[in-house]
Image (tube, grey):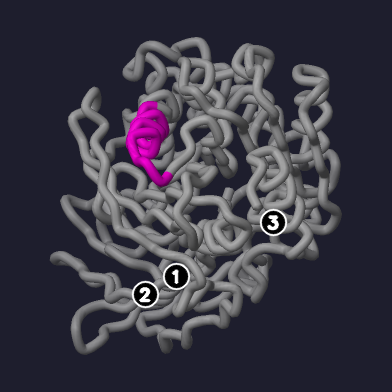
């Protein structure tokens, strides 16, 4: 499944391989398919590559890091954490592997259909909500240690005008490596959230994920539980500052960041309140299984195709769950399922390596129910009607049963990023000018200002 594709333009560098041309393939979703096109051309400073997803009306999505090493082709879609890894055939005409982003991955075989390709990097899209200076508040570049992990994290702290101490919130990103602005397709939602909250009198800390920007760490075996220790480190940093009111310090997470907030709180982090934006209330296995079904239906697939895809995904999830504490055993079980459904061996190997990582196994197995029940501070949960990643119908009602006193809002017509959307498919993200719907900003900032008693 393609959750999202990014737009930051960067030259792609090739190593000892002729990768120039037009490459076409399709992600199989049951009996349906979502076409994928990669166009690669030689530029003055190396290769330039763009991706198209015609069925999702997405074109000219820049690709970075295109390489071939020892017969393995790799490239990334950097801002969204998208990545491809596949085996190159002996004659160089096909790449057989997996396209993935965050917890989701789908097999993909790309075949060269032309020896040349037209590649003109598009101009950057308009993102009018991205804040630009001068700001009516202070913005401070900060670093803080996570001593237990042996790393330092880097971020931005925005402070309202005045002497304080101020109420504050820490922003926690969704799945995949993200920078402090949670940049995706030139959208910077965390910069927009920080700007809106700080204008309401609330200090905001946002920081680069591990391995991104100025932050240390970063590996596929670091889990959501590890990220929760980063959130605690951020709280410790803010609680030591005289301009922050430690009694009015909360956590606000998007998608997987909602789980990060719950885990940190359940481990004793003294959060005064918690905000989840499209945060799961069910296990990762349930999320990922429902996710692929939603993508099929939103892409125009039939109910039968959606059910077939859901059944296949459930088999993969069971293979992971049965081996949640043993990466090599999980990889063998995943390859066995892939062989049974007819995936090529090279494709199965790539999928097994990704799905058996420590992060993936933890995410798949983790059920937030106990952490939600144990939360004894005010909680706001915002869901979007057209979210295909964390479906509202699956998560909002379940959260209500776990924490009846939580304030739960389902916003009509929005997608996983809280943008106004037509289908909610990730392919729309790039074409939507608005970064955050005003109703989402209002719902969150009004609630936080009220709970934190901000002026």
Which of labels 2 and 1 is toward the front? 2
Q: Are marks 1 and 3 in contact (CB under 8 Å)?
A: no
Question: Residue 365 in the image: x percent, y percent?
Answer: 53, 18
Q: Are marks 2 and 1 in contact (CB under 8 Å)?
A: yes
Where on the picture, by quarter, is residue 126?
bottom right
Query: Relative to 274, is 385 above or below?
Result: below
Residue that label 1 marks: 38
Magenta segment, prevailing SS (helix, strand or loop): helix
Residue that label 3 marks: 418
Of labels 2 and 3, earlier in sequence is 2
- The secondary element bearing badge 1 is classed as strand
**Residue at 22% across / 59% down in the picture?**
68
Q: Is residue 377 visible?
A: yes
Numbered range of the magenta stretch: 229-243
Magenta includes 260? no
Which of labels 2 and 3 is toward the front? 3
**Residue at 74% across / 57% down in the picture?**
442
Along the viewing direction, whichever of 90 and 61 lies nearer the viewer: 61
**Residue at 42% across / 61% down in the picture?**
79
């Amino acid at each position: 499944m393609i959750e999202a594709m990014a737009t930051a333009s960067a030259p792609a560098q090739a190593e000892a391989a002729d990768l120039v041309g037009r490459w076409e393939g399709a992600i199989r979703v049951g009996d349906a398919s979502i076409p994928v096109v990669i166009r690669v051309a030689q530029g003055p400073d190396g290769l330039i590559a763009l991706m198209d997803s015609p069925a999702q009306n997405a074109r000219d999505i820049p690709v970075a890091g295109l390489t071939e090493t020892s017969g393995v082709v790799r490239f990334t879609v950097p801002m969204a954490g998208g990545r491809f890894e596949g085996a190159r055939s002996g004659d160089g005409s096909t790449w057989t592997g997996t396209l993935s982003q965050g917890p989701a991955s789908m097999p993909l075989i790309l075949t060269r259909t032309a020896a040349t390709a037209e590649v003109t990097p598009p101009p950057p899209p308009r993102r009018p909500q991205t804040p630009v200076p001068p700001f009516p508040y202070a913005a401070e570049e900060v670093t803080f240690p996570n001593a237990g992990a042996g790393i330092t994290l880097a971020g931005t702290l925005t402070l309202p005008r005045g002497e304080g101490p101020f109420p504050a919130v820490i922003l926690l990103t969704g799945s995949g490596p993200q920078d402090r602005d949670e940049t995706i397709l030139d959208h910077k939602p965390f910069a927009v959230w920080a700007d809106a909250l700080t204008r309401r009198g609330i200090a905001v800390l946002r920081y680069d994920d591990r391995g991104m920007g100025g932050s240390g760490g970063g590996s596929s075996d670091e889990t959501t539980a590890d990220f929760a220790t980063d959130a605690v480190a951020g709280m410790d940093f803010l609680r030591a500052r005289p301009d922050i009111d430690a009694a009015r310090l909360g956590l606000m997470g998007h998608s997987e960041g909602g789980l990060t907030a719950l885990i940190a709180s359940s481990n004793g982090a003294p959060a005064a309140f918690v905000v989840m934006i499209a945060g799961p209330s069910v296990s990762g296995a349930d999320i990922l299984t429902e996710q692929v079904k939603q993508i099929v239906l939103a892409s125009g697939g039939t109910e039968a195709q959606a059910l077939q895809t859901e059944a296949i995904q459930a088999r993969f999830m069971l293979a992971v769950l049965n081996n949640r504490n043993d990466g090599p055993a999980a990889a063998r079980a995943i390859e066995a399922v892939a062989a049974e459904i007819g995936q090529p061996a090279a494709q199965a190997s790539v999928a097994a390596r990704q799905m058996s990582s420590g992060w993936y196994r933890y995410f798949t197995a983790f059920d937030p129910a106990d952490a939600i029940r144990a939360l004894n501070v005010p909680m706001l949960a915002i869901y979007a009607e057209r979210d295909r990643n964390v479906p509202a119908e699956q998560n909002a009602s379940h959260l209500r049963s776990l924490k009846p006193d939580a304030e739960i809002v389902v916003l009509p017509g929005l997608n996983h990023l809280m943008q106004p959307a037509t289908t909610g498919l990730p392919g729309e993200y790039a074409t939507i000018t608005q970064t955050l719907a005003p109703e989402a900003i209002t719902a969150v900032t009004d609630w936080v200002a009220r709970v934190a008693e901000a002026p």
